[in-house]
Image (spheres, helix red, strand yellow):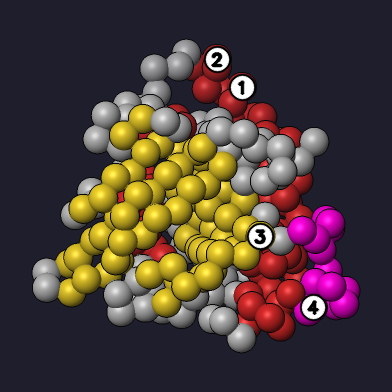
Amino acid sequence: MNTSLLSATKDSIELRGVSKSFASQKVLERISLTIKEGEIVALLGASGGGKSTLLNLMSGLLPADSGDIVIQGVPARQFQHWQRIAYLFQEDRLLPWRTVEQNVHFGLENSALSKQERRRRVADALTLVGLSAFVHHWPHQLSGGMRSRVALARSLVVQPQILLMDEPFSRLDPQTRGSMHEELLRIQALTGMTVVLVTHDVEEAVVLADRVVILKPQPGRIHLEATLHLPRPRVATHPDVNEQIRLLRLEV
């Protein structure tokens, strides 16, 4: 069952008037945004809009200069369950001296889980992304799409409730990217995770998201929020999907 905006009832992440500067440069200015539990939200816009900084604030990697960040109903400064949040970066960041299985297990190495439970979670994560037959392969033996699946499995192995993604598919060819889109939607439907995706690609945002948030730069601020009432699966060539892509491109 796909947990969409329509079925979400709780706030997963809430930003209230959040601003962030580096040195004398303001990167984000008074960002207010609520992301519902189980929602897929795409942060869209040109470079310099503060999209990645916004993810870093949501993940706890950076503190806000002003405003409030609330994670699952708890102020970020008091939130203690950061293991519920996984972060998938643009680069797959696989360790070349580790096998697929060992790379996925890396996500659990600081966990208090038993060895048996860790092995089970690694096996489950690799099954979820369709790589059970490649557990003993090395990263150099994998295609770009398979490496992306391993990185996704490493994020999923902690069984996150929130998945933050910073353009993780941008380096893939169009066919592989489309396959990863399908995979992400399938896994999100199974797990009910909240997903926040940073992208420059309007088509990717429309294909994946329940809601698209467009940021304008210097400093980053919310320009537009668009809720997408399009049935899935979404194909860019479908007239309704294509029209939504066209309209959002005018706003970016």
How many numbered marks have been drawn onto this rendered protein structure?
Answer: 4
Is the Cβ of the residue at disc 3 closer than 8 Å to that at disc 4?
no
| Mark closer to the chain start, 3 or 2 | 2
Crowding at dot 1, Cα within 10 Å, few <14 / some 14-19 / many 20+, comes out as few
- Location of residue 40 in the rendering, given as x and y in whole percent from the top left corner: 62, 51
Label disc, if present, on residue 227 of the rendered structure: 3
Q: Amino acid at mark 1?
A: Arg
Query: Where 39 falls versus 24 (above or below)?
Result: above
Give the CA distance from mark 4 to mark 2. Answer: 48 Å
- Which residue range is magenta in the image? 229-243
Residue underneath mark 2: 116
The residue sitting at 45% across, 16% down in the picture is 113
Label 4 sits on a secondary structure element that is helix
Give the CA distance from mark 1 to mark 4. Answer: 42 Å
Residue underneath mark 1: 120
- The image quadrant where one finds the N terminus is top right
Give the CA distance from mark 1 to mark 3. Answer: 38 Å
Crowding at dot 2, Cα within 10 Å, few <14 / some 14-19 / many 20+, comes out as few
Give the CA distance from mark 3 to mark 2. Answer: 43 Å
| Mark closer to the chain start, 4 or 2 | 2
